[in-house]
Image (tube, rainbow, N blue to C red):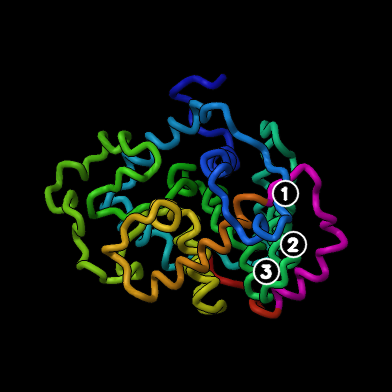
Amino acid sequence: MPLDNEPLQHPDQWDDDVRRRYAKRQSSARESAGTKAAFRDYDTPARHSVREFYRQNHERQTVAFNRRMRQQWLPLQTRRMSVWEAMEFLNELVDDSDPDTALPQIAHAMQTAEAIRADGHPDWFVLTGLIHDMGKVLCLFGEPQWAVVGDTFPVGCRWSDRIVYPELFAGNPDRHVERYQTRCGIYQEHCGLDQVMLSWGHDEYLYHVVRDHLPPEALAMIRYHSFYSAHREQEYDWLMNDVDRRMLDHVRAFNQYDLYTKTDEPPDVQRLTPYYRELVDRYFPGPLAW
């Protein structure tokens, strides 16, 4: 077993921990239709490396850090590449130590997208399933995992005790900023999530990369799919407006596929690639700024 101070070996460890936490609470339309798949039951405690990951994440995701990350990454000047090039780039994140699977990232993406497609959802929804984790290229650009993956949460206001491992915020220096420890913090009540700075990671980054190409529902799925304290734990309603509440319904619908489509049976990537290349080209006809 990893030592308590050993960080995650791969982003998929966070994905697996999320599935473990929520596996027994799923209530998707796929279940109610009697088509529930047999997913792993994560009865064992989370890996020590996951807790260490969240210690680093919760201590370092400060207001100052988030402002710095947006200044560094959101000019989107690091690289120009197409969505498909980004998908192939992400294949470098295959986890040789993952006990569940050795599938490349594109196979994980297709598993999610194919489940959405099988349920007859619109093509933009299918595309969202395919690309939703592409912001993890930040790992390949040199960012540490605690700044790329993990449950997201607002910074600049009091942390909810429904965030995973809330006790680990004890080491965050923002704890000593009085304004940051109020209910709304630096925000106005019901200002809308678009005005709220969520902890930095692959969700927020990808949202900015693709924001001019997808409908609002897809953008909400990408931007908020790791915001579990809101869409799963019903927290932070006081910062939301009516549009946010409608959008979170779409996020919940999406997350059923994100959480519960990882299986041992790989998709036929070669057979499916022409369909997904055409779908990608329809929405993203040229290279994007990253």
Residue 242 occupies quadrant: bottom left
Within 10 Å of disc 2 (Cα), the crowding (few <14, some 14-19, many 20+) is: many
Indicate whether 274 appears above or below 12.
below
The boundaries of the magenta stretch are 261-281
Q: Position of residue 126 (x, y in %)?
A: 67, 69
Residue 53 at what x, y percent from top left?
A: 45, 35
Residue depicted at 39% across the width and 76% down the height: 243
| Magenta residue check for 271 | yes
Tag 2's secondary structure?
helix
Q: Which residue is mark 2?
A: 114
Q: Whole-Å distance between the Cαs marked 1 and 3?
A: 19 Å
Question: So how many labels did they put on this image?
Answer: 3
Please state the horizontal and vertical placement of residue 52, each as a whole percent of the image. 43, 30
Q: Main secondary structure of the magenta part?
A: helix
- The amino acid type found where label 1 is placed reads Ala
Marking on residue 126: 3
User: Which residue in the protein does label 1 denote?
Assistant: 37
Q: In terms of image quadrants, where is residue 176?
A: top left
Q: Nearer the viewer, residue 44 or 281?
A: 44
For the N terminus, which image quadrant? top right
Q: Amino acid at mark 2?
A: Glu
Observer-nearest residue: 217 or 76? 217
4 w.r.t. 46: above or below: above
